[in-house]
Image (cartoon, coloured by chain):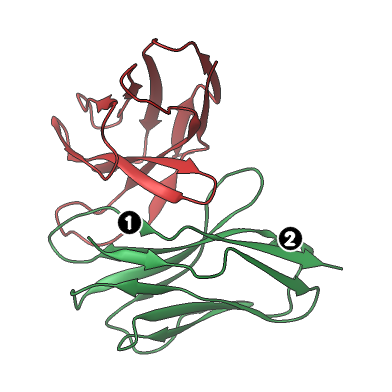
Amino acid sequence: DGGITQSPKYLFRKEGQNVTLSCEQNLNHDAMYWYRQDPGQGLRLIYYSQIVNDFQKGDIAEGYSVSREKKESFPLTVTSAQKNPTAFYLCVSSIGAFGQGAGELFFGEGSRLTVL
Amino acid sequence: AQTVTQSQPEMSVQEAETVTLSCTYDTSESDYYLFWYKQPPSRQMILVIRQEAYKQQNATENRFSVNFQKAAKSFSLKISDSQLGDAAMYFCAYRSAGNSGYALNFGKGTSLLVTP
């Protein structure tokens, strides 16, 4: 079955450490996104990519980095520069890219990152 | 950037009754998509209903319907015959249908409680 897989589901990190969250999709979607979810804040966009080897900053990109070397993969690195990294992270993919249509968003199950 | 506002952080409804969740948005675009997503405690996002801005007819999906007022930039969700399984966080979302290819913008969510 096609879908999005995020891993790990739960992750603990010590302060000062970088951590990478994995996001893989086998839906052949062009567009992939990372959102951060905090209580009372909704979903805030961190980075998005509409094509391989290209990505754009979202509203809260500081302290995060991404890569898009393969169509199916869009890993997110939470760096030590992110001052408040404890949150729930959602990876999303979509058919639509460059105005090909809104499509429907497909969500991963999320990764819960806790900084100790 | 487009903003989405959900003015009700929490709502409560009795089983079998009807409840309406409000959503307003700000945009200068004429062509876009609006969505309602449900997020149960499992955190898995579930698409409830979608509305294309160019369609005047309000979208419906079984017990879920929307009241789309384009001029007023309002997109409320009505849940009829509420069930215990409807209890969840509900997010209103906006996506451009143009060539910007930008991601969805989400509201901060409304937590719906369903009481027996």
Q: Position of residue A97 (x, y in %)?
A: 19, 51
Quadrant into which the C terminus of chain A falls: top right
Pointer 2 indicates a residue of which chain? B
Name above or below for residue B32 compared with residue A105.
Answer: below
Name above or below for residue A32 compared with residue A23.
Answer: below
- Regarding mark 2 in the picture, which secondary structure is present there? helix
Q: Position of residue A47 (x, y in %)?
A: 26, 38
Distance of mark 2 from mark 1, alpha carbons? 26 Å
Q: Where is residue A66 in the image (x, y as percent from the top left)?
A: 25, 26
Residue position for label 1 = B104
- Regarding mark 1 in the picture, which secondary structure is present there? loop
Question: Does any portion of residue A65 appear in the rendered image?
Answer: yes
Residue position for label 2 = B85
Q: Which residue is drawn at 59% across and 44% down?
A: B43
Amino acid type, residue under disc 1 in the picture: Leu
Q: Residues within 10 Å of mark 2 (few under 14, many from 20)?
A: few
Colour displayed for chain B in the image of the structure: green
Pointer 1 indicates a residue of which chain? B
- Res A56 → quadrant: top left
- Res B93 → quadrant: bottom left
Amino acid type, residue under disc 2 in the picture: Gly
Q: Residue furthest front?
A: A83
Which of marks 1 and 2 precedes in the sequence? 2
Direction from residue B70 to residue A68 in the image, left or right: left
Q: Which residue is drawn at 64% across and 43% down?
A: B42
Direction from residue A21 to residue A56 in the image, left or right: left
In the foreground, B9 or B16 = B9
Q: How crowded is mark 1: few (under 14 residues within 10 Å), some or many (20 or more)?
A: many
Q: Which residue is drawn at 19% across and 78% down?
A: B30
Q: Which chain gets the red colouring?
A: A
In the foreground, B31 or A51 = B31
